[in-house]
Amino acid sequence: MKRVLIIAYYWPPNAGVGVYRWLKFTKYLPQFGWRPVVYTPDNPELMAVDEGLLKDIPPEAEVIKAPITEPYGWYKKLTGKKKNERLQTAFLREEGGSSWMEDMANWVRSNFFIPDARIWWVKPSVKRLEAYLKANPVDVIVTTGSPHSLHLIGRELKKRTGLPWVADFRDPWTNIDYYGQLRLTRLADAEQHRLERLVLTEADQVLTVSWAWAEELRDLGAKHVDVITNGFDTDDLPVPAAPVDEAWSLVHVGSISATRNVPELWEALAQRISRDPEFKQRFRLRLVGGVDHTVLQSIEAAGLNEHLERIPHVDHTEALRHMQRARALLLPVNDTPNASGFLPAKVFEYLSVQRPILAIAPEGADIVRVLGDVHATVSRGDQASTQAAVDALFTTTDAAMDVGHFDRKYLTGQLAELLERTVRH
């Protein structure tokens, strides 16, 4: 078997959206003739924990764990958080307001830890991996970001070993939706762009998750860019499937940040409730995961609180059960400049359970290409179309379409071909 070194920050039992892409690639790569060697922190900051994910690590995989020093202990002290308190998703705040200490800590983190808080892991990782590779050769190196510090490890290893290097952008770097909220100095902003360009121009291959983001990366200087979307794993689907709700449930699974707020949808739901007694009696808005306080305020302002069900973070299996139970699934795409390329990983699991999906996204976004004509996609701010979509909701619980090209095993086959090409060139 050929060997691929995968440098990833997010790895089980750490849970969350950043884990699944390379965990699933690792699961299926041996079936395509590749032995994965995963390098990951031994003591990362845990976003959430899901021990059930460990079952996906195949026996052929080698997992190397190394200690990481992160500034989050310092950050928690400054912001008054408990040592074992888990940090929220970037710029998602479930409670309103922030202290001057939090603002100062965020400013320091943004301007002194470039490109991100894992920068201290770069030098020791390069030293450790250079020694490892001399004794245990691999054919290609892969780094996946965010955090984008990991790309700097790959860049330095390529320079020292001559190995081909694939930089996987699960998220944009300077085009990430919250970049404008970082309050960077001009020097810090310039350094972020400098490092990003170095990675994009020096990587042998750049990989990303959507077609619009691929174009953005080309515009930023990347020469060889391919798209392999995220997907779903049929092995994960609960069997037997959870029964569909009797209630008319509109379900969102995952975090809803302020940029995903959809006031026009809340208003459309309120309008239908006001004129449809049966809908008023049966409708439930179920939000599974973290929700920004501005979104909750918007829901309350629309008068939907009595229909709202909030469920905190759940493990992956339970998240899929919530999707299976839903009468319809909600997918609000971020209201940000590069939203056209935003393909949240959950959309593919939404597709796998074959429930109707209501997506609110920019016109012409990649999400429209993925959902096709089977599901409802309305443009942000289009109140009339949103109202029409809400009025058509719950007319069916089935929305079957061919989604085999989003199966994780199929996508891993695409990755194996890309790795082969990268090694040959």
Image (cartoon, rainbow, N blue to C red):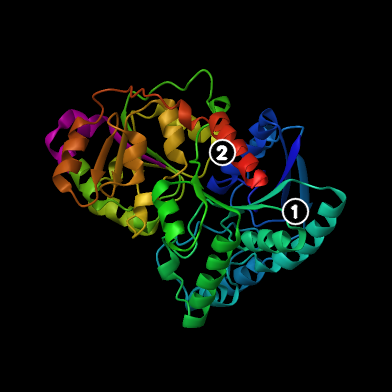
Residue 7 seen from this side = no
Residue occupied by mark 2:
315
Q: x and y percent of residue 217 in the render?
A: 46, 58
Please state the extent of the stretch shown in magenta in the rendering. Answer: 271-287
Quarter in which the N terminus is drawn: top right
Horizontal and vertical percent position of residue 385: 17, 42
Query: Which of label 1 and label 2 is nearer to you?
Result: 1
Structural crowding at the residue carrying mark 1, measured as other residues with C-alpha within 10 Å and reported as few (<14), some (14–19) or many (≥20): few
* In the image: residue 298, left or right of residue 53: left
Q: Secondary structure at mark 1?
A: loop
Q: Callout 1, which amino acid?
A: Asp
Q: Nearer the viewer, residue 117 or 300?
A: 117
Asked if the magenta segment contains residue 277, the reply would be yes
Which residue is more in the foreground, 212 or 323?
A: 212
Quarter of the image for residue 273 reads top left
Front in this rendered view, residue 366 or 285: 366
Quadrant of residue 367 in the image? top left
Along the viewing direction, whichever of 66 and 247 lies nearer the viewer: 66
In the displayed image of the protein, which residue is found farthest to the left?
A: 275
Does the segment drawn in magenta span residue 171?
no
How far apart marks 1 and 2 lie (CA) works out to: 21 Å
Circle 2: element type: loop
Residue 230 visible in the displayed image? yes
Q: Which residue is mark 1?
A: 42
Numbered circles on residues, count: 2
